[in-house]
Image (spheres, rainbow, N blue to C red):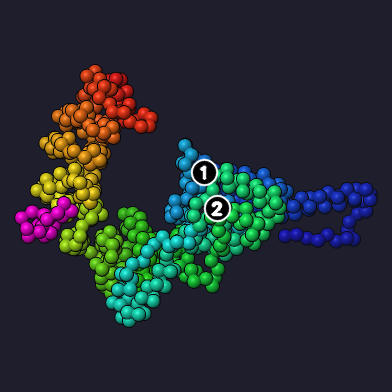
């Protein structure tokens, strides 16, 4: 509390002293005011510092202070900035952007990165209420940071679920389009959600210039008087002009009346670190009680949050009660499972089934039955390598081996490589023998299915290895040989007979690419067992001339000579 002095109690002083005191107070007041007027430029530098240093070089130190938020070696640096109650007037983010999830660096030894999820947490949480609260401008120096193209494609399952809910076909299609428009989750919309109410957000709708080039463009802008516009909260035509040769774009954060505000409110229910797990589960329950088409855009967030619950979380009484409330909601369960079974993408159907299990809507036997039905449905259609990937992934722990009899075809053997690969993923030894020869198939689709299958079910039997290597050696087409060898390279061979087969193939290969592929396999194998002077001599003398510099053959020769 401050008190004003009574003028009648102040003793007279010499005029010079009075003047000196007054001058000191004025200087102190001016200094404090000058500091208070300084704008804070926050920088997040996960890659090039060129842009940051250009801002620093041209903005006057008496008007701007710079705060680098990244603390090298500290993974929670953004949370640290929140705890420090930092307030940014301007934010400059420099880093490669993957177009979806994070800003990252390509510089050796740099481990810091900026997840978009962390930006959402900072934007939504009361614990970080100051960081973005007074932002006037954001500069996003990364490719596609303001790309307006939707990252999510809402499929026809939305309209079908709305029809099941009682809407007319016309209304269902209209509502589905609205949902798709709001939840396309373009990079631009995601940044607008994060930087709510920020007047100006600069970024790039496509490829962004690299750091030194961006710095040069910024330098031209500042030399032309652009420094006076920084932190004004007004979009600069001058800045856009200096970046006219690039894809620079400008937008603004969503406002209170924006259609995306409701989406932001929902997103923040997942991102706000001030909410307890039970509160977030209650919100999940609210989403599940909506029409399924309205829940579907949030499925990924629901899946991630429910999957993040630890055993300790689930033992908490409030969490257990919230989960029990969801498990007992029969109407929501029915809508959810109907949507899952009707999903256009098999992977989404499988993921929804697994989440239903975690929510208490399916027992382990019921989950297995749902996944078995999914595999059976895929076998009834045209199969692709993605179906093989799905079947093997679902059965990586052999939970679906017991389902094999239920999905086996009536015919004596599978009708296609795809069918054989799916059945082999479910544990069929007979089907496996039909998949392996497809490594040397001239049909791309068959090769891809065999390649995917072997990533999940590697060659472990010496007899299988010898058959596969013999098949590769007998192929006449070098292109087919190369891709089969590349697939074999991931198997880390140790069978001496298989390795010898490949070394016999090397001197009779018709293409230098085949020889390089053979060397690639041997490098990833137990090559010490073939480290003899004779093999090295064969590698040198039988080598076909190839374009380019050193390759796997050179590396293999060095390794063998060292042994």
Q: Nearer the viewer, residue 396 or 379?
A: 379
Q: Which numbered disc, 2 or 1, marks the residue closer to the eye? A: 2
Q: Is residue 27 above or below residue 378?
A: above
Q: Residue at x 51, y 45 (%)?
A: 46
Q: Residue at x 46, y 63 (%)?
A: 268
Please tell me whether mark 2 sits on a helix, a strand or a loop: loop
Q: Residue at x 28, y 59 (%)?
A: 347
Q: Earlier in the sequence, mark 2 or mark 1?
A: 1
Left/right of residue 291 with respect to residue 252 in the rendered view: left
Label 2 neighbour load within 10 Å: few <14, some 14-19, many 20+? some
Q: Say which residue label 1 marks.
A: 47
Left/right of residue 392 with respect to residue 34 in the rendered view: left
Q: Nearer the viewer, residue 292 or 441?
A: 441
> Percent position (x, y) of residue 546?
33, 31
Q: Say which residue label 2 marks.
A: 246
Please tell me whether mark 1 sits on a helix, a strand or a loop: loop
Q: Quadrant of the N terminus?
A: bottom right
Q: Is residue 84 above or below residue 555?
A: below
Q: Quadrant of residue 373?
A: bottom left
Q: Magenta segment range? A: 401-419
Q: Which residue lies most toward the top here?
A: 533
Residue 139 visible? The answer is no
- Give the number of callouts: 2
Residue 509 visible? The answer is yes
Q: Quadrant of residue 559?
A: top left
């Amino acid at each position: 509390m401050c008190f004003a002095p009574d003028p009648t109690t102040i003793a007279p002083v010499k005029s010079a002293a009075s003047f000196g005191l007054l001058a000191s107070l004025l200087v102190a007041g001016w200094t404090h005011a000058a500091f208070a007027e300084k704008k804070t430029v926050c920088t997040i530098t996960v890659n090039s510092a060129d842009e940051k240093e250009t801002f620093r070089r041209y903005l006057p130190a008496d008007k701007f202070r710079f705060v680098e938020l990244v603390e090298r070696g500290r993974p929670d640096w953004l949370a640290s900035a929140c705890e420090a109650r930092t307030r940014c007037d301007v934010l400059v983010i420099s880093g490669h952007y993957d177009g979806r999830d994070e800003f990252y660096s390509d510089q050796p030894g740099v481990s810091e990165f900026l997840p978009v999820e962390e930006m959402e947490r900072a934007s939504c949480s009361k614990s970080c209420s100051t960081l973005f609260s007074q932002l006037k401008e954001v500069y996003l120096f990364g490719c596609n940071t303001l790309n307006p193209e939707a990252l999510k494609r809402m499929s026809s399952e939305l309209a079908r679920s709305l029809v099941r809910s009682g809407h007319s076909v016309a209304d269902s299609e209209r509502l589905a389009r609205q949902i798709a428009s709001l939840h396309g989750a373009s990079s631009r919309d995601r940044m607008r959600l994060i930087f709510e109410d920020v007047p100006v957000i600069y970024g790039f709708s496509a490829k962004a210039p690299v750091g030194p080039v961006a710095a040069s463009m910024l330098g031209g802008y500042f030399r032309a008087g652009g420094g006076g516009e920084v932190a004004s909260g007004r979009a600069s035509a001058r800045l856009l002009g200096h970046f006219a040769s690039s894809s620079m774009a400008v937008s603004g954060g969503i406002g209170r009346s924006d259609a995306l505000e409701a989406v932001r409110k929902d997103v923040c229910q997942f991102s706000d670190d001030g909410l307890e797990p039970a509160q977030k589960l209650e919100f999940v329950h609210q989403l599940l009680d909506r029409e399924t088409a309205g829940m579907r855009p949030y499925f990924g967030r629901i899946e991630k949050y429910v999957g993040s619950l630890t055993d300790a979380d689930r033992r908490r009484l409030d969490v257990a009660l919230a989960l029990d409330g969801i498990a007992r909601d029969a109407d929501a369960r029915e809508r959810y499972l109907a949507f899952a079974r009707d999903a256009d993408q098999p992977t989404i159907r499988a993921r929804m089934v697994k989440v239903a299990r975690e929510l208490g809507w399916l027992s382990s036997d019921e989950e297995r039955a749902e996944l078995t039905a999914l595999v059976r449905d895929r076998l009834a259609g045209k199969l692709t390598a993605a179906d093989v990937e799905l079947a093997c992934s679902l059965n990586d722990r052999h939970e679906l081996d017991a389902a094999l009899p239920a999905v086996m075809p009536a015919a004596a053997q599978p009708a296609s490589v795809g069918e054989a690969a799916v059945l082999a993923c479910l544990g069929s030894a007979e089907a496996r023998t039909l998949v392996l020869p497809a490594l040397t198939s001239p049909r791309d689709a068959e090769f891809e299915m065999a390649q995917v299958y072997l990533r999940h079910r590697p060659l472990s039997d010496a007899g299988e290895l010898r058959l596969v290597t013999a098949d590769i050696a007998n192929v006449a087409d070098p292109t087919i040989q190369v891709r089969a060898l590349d697939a074999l390279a991931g198997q880390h061979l140790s069978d001496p007979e298989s390795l010898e087969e490949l070394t016999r193939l090397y001197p009779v290969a018709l293409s230098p690419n085949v020889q390089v592929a053979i060397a690639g396999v041997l490098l990833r194998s137990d090559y010490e067992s073939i480290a003899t002077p004779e093999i090295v001599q064969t590698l040198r003398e039988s080598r076909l001339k190839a374009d380019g510099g050193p390759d796997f053959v050179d590396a293999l020769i060095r390794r063998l000579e060292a042994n």
